[in-house]
Amino acid sequence: MDALIQIGFALALLAVTYFTGRRVERRHYASIRARERELAMLPAVTFRQIPSGWVVDGLGVVSGSVVVSVDYFKRFLAGLRTLVGGRVTSYETLLDRARREAILRCKEDARQRGYQAVVNLRLETTRVSRASNNSRATAGVEVLAFGTGLELRRDPR
Amino acid sequence: MILSTTETIPGRTIKRFFGVVTGSTVRSKHIGRDLMAGIKNIFGGELKGYTELLQESREDALARMVQEAESLGANAVVNLRFATSSITQGAAELFAYGTAVQVD
Amino acid sequence: MQYDPKLPADGINTSAEHPLREFALLVAGLIGAVLALIAIAALAVDRLVPLVPPSLEARWFGGWLTDAAAASDPRSAPVQALLDRVVSHWSDAPYPFRAGVIDEPDPNALALPGGAILVTSGLLDRVGSENELALVLGHELGHFRARDHLRGLGRGLAAQLVLGALGGSGDLVSGLSAFAGALAQHGFDRRQESQADTFGLSLVHAEYGHVAGARDLFAHLARSQRDAPATGRRLASYLDTHPLSEDRVAALAAEAAAHDWATEGPLTPWVRRPDAE
């Protein structure tokens, strides 16, 4: 009978984390969209060379990073998916959020330092593991966005 | 949609540039492939299953990136870069990112 | 070149499919696949079990109830004597059977691979006649004849193997595997029970010349089920592992009628203690 209790407990946990995870995600996306609109006037590009016509007064490295955590429901769904194969959809929103958040933080960093543009933007993703009995458990995903911030004499727009 | 890892498209000039566009996928192979890979781990050789997996992921990620670029009204993506990472055991994330531009 | 601060469309890098729908599909698909695998493994076990020769089975498991252990318990001697008499009517008996008694207030009987039959003291206290005990022993012999206990063992092992191979999504999979293992081992199916019943009945008839008392057995056990206080027990009651149903009693009566066996006759009393206390 304790097998059934185990299953019941796991199902309850799945249900709870599904709803909490969904709420966290919605709030995060709302925040992301608002800030993206706000920071749209600061270009972040992957150009390696500074575009001609831009007069640069100063430059420096800017970066932004975030670690987004995985909830139980997403992890369980991903586990099932790796048995069957195909797109792991539960992690896609995770990575999307992490990436957009990292780029936003990079732009904010640039703005705080007085830069008007970020060039040579690069993105690095890593997995953050949790130390547990199942030592390969994914605790979260870290995305780092970094580039060179440029202080421009004339507005790029 | 022109895709390039170079700074500019030779012979064309960039009229406008938008921001960074990204395309990403997380894919996994089914457990049968994992078992085969485990065996290959002992004997050596190319893990064809995983090569296929990453190839599909690359195409998928590029397609999504192109979709984002199209939604901006761009007709080219320059300075294209790829990044792969392992998000969870048995699955790989691949994302492509570049700058969406409008060339003449 | 000019900068155009437009934002790309949302939702391109995520899937529109609702996670709950995907969850339901994956779980259903996985459970289906696991059950199919277990069923195939069980079929394989069923095919392989008859190939295990009884001599091998006796060698692997036979040590579970040594003669010394049985001899040291005075209660087992009359049970062993009855068992020997009942077995004598089974011409193909594959190996010697040994009887043992366990101290358990709940009436129950177990068949262990290798030829050991254990009865609980609770069962010995409740049978109204020797005939009833003979039916119980004969029923267990019927399971031996069909190698049912080996099948149960094999199926349980197969279930554990399949689920173990799938690795861990953690608690859920281990919970499911424990549950499936328990299910697979839980007992013999109806067909196995009924054939054990008929074999047991035929042995009883061979021993006594009639099958009187067979129906009384179930009545006595049902009464004990009602009277017994409900406390936690390691061994489930006889009726838990051998579910009683009207069909079983009716089937026995039909079997007796088919062979034209007398259902009335003198019942041999069961001597509970060889040294009357």
Image (tube, rainbow, N blue to C red):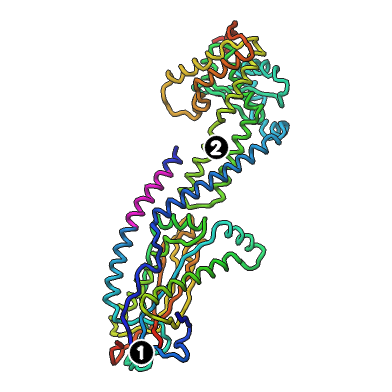
Q: Mark 1 is on which residue type?
A: Met
Residue C111 vs residue B99, the one in the foreground: B99
Assess disc 2: are there few (<14), some (14-19) or many (≥20) residues with their C-alpha within 10 Å of its C-alpha: many
Which quadrant: the N terminus of chain C?
bottom left
Position of A41 with respect to A99 (left or right) is left
Q: Which residue is mark 1?
A: C1
On screen, B57 above or below A82? below
Q: Which residue is mark 2?
A: C184
Q: Secondary structure under badge 2?
A: helix
Query: Residue B69 appears at what percent x and percent y?
Result: 39, 77
Marks 2 and 1, the one that precedes in the sequence: 1
- Magenta-tinted stretch: A6-21
Query: Residue A107 appears at what percent x and percent y?
Result: 32, 78
Assess disc 1: are there few (<14), some (14-19) or many (≥20) residues with their C-alpha within 10 Å of its C-alpha: some
Q: Residue at x 61, y 20 (%)?
A: C198
Indicate the quadrant where residue C207 lies: top right
Indicate the quadrant where residue B34 lies: bottom right
Q: Residue at x 38, y 93 (%)?
A: A52
Q: Residue at x 50, y 20 (%)?
A: C246
Position of A113 with respect to C24 (left or right) is left
On screen, B37 above or below B6? above
